[in-house]
């Protein structure tokens, strides 16, 4: 259900869920500071999208560091999940949101190839967007949430 919720609710849920989990595997988990604001959308679905992105960061990164970064543009909040040790070739980047597509770096991991595809469907339904880039050996997946 579409509604309104605070950015802090979303970030707190993700932080609480992953802080201990990542500490156990000795992954540095960093959450940037941000300005709290009201977002538009389904908070449960938004949590699902961010969890999926973080799970991928855990699965495909090198386990050294995962961080959340925040920015704002055009009435939206951008949450970027960044992990070190990107193992995905640049040439495969355009396909990561396709259904059933799995990267050449996914051989050792189980999965359906639907996670990011579903994330994109959910973000589009809520008037948001999701995109990815690779920079300095880091994978960055950014979810764009409309502000209320």
Image (cartoon, rainbow, N blue to C red):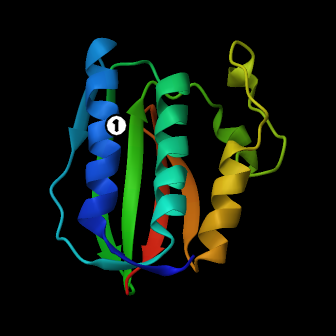
- Number of on-image labels: 1
Q: Where residue 56 appears, x then y in whole percent? A: 55, 34
Q: Where residue 15 appears, x then y in whole percent? A: 28, 42
Q: Residue at x 68, y 18 (%)?
A: 109
Q: Residue at x 39, y 66 (%)?
A: 78
Between 116 and 41, the one lying in front of the other is 41
Q: Which residue is mark 1?
A: 17
Looking at the image, residue 140 sits to the left or right of residue 98; the answer is left
- Image quarter where the N terminus lies is bottom right
Looking at the image, residue 33 sits to the left or right of residue 133; the answer is left
The quarter of the displayed image where residue 27 is located: top left
Residue 66 in view here: no
Q: Residue at x 19, y 71 (%)?
A: 36
The quarter of the displayed image where residue 2 is located: bottom right
Q: Where residue 94 appears, x then y in whole percent? A: 71, 51
Does 91 appear above or below 128? above
Give the structural element (helix, strand or loop) at label 1. helix
Between 48 and 35, the one lying in front of the other is 48
Does 76 appear above or below 129? below
- Image quarter where the C terminus lies is bottom left
Does 106 appear above or below 141? above
Looking at the image, residue 24 sits to the left or right of residue 58; the answer is left
Does 9 appear above or below 91? below
Is disc 1 surrounded by few (<14), some (14 to 19) or many (20+) residues within 10 Å? Answer: few
Between 138 and 66, the one lying in front of the other is 66
Residue 27 in view here: yes
Q: Where residue 16 appears, x then y in whole percent? A: 27, 39
């Amino acid at each position: 259900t579409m509604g309104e919720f605070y950015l802090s609710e979303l970030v707190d849920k993700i932080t609480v869920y992953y802080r201990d989990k990542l500490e156990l595997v000795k992954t540095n988990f960093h959450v940037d500071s941000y300005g709290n604001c009201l977002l538009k959308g389904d908070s449960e679905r938004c949590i699902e999208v961010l969890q999926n992105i973080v799970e991928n960061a855990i699965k495909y990164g090198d386990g050294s560091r995962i961080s959340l970064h925040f920015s704002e543009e055009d009435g939206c909040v951008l949450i970027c999940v960044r992990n070190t040790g990107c193992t995905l070739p640049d040439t495969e980047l355009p396909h990561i949101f396709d259904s059933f597509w799995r990267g050449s770096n996914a051989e050792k991991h189980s999965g359906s190839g639907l996670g990011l595809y579903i994330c994109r469907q959910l973000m589009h339904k809520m008037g948001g967007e999701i995109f990815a880039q690779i920079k300095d050996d880091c994978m960055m997946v950014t979810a764009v949430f409309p502000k209320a």
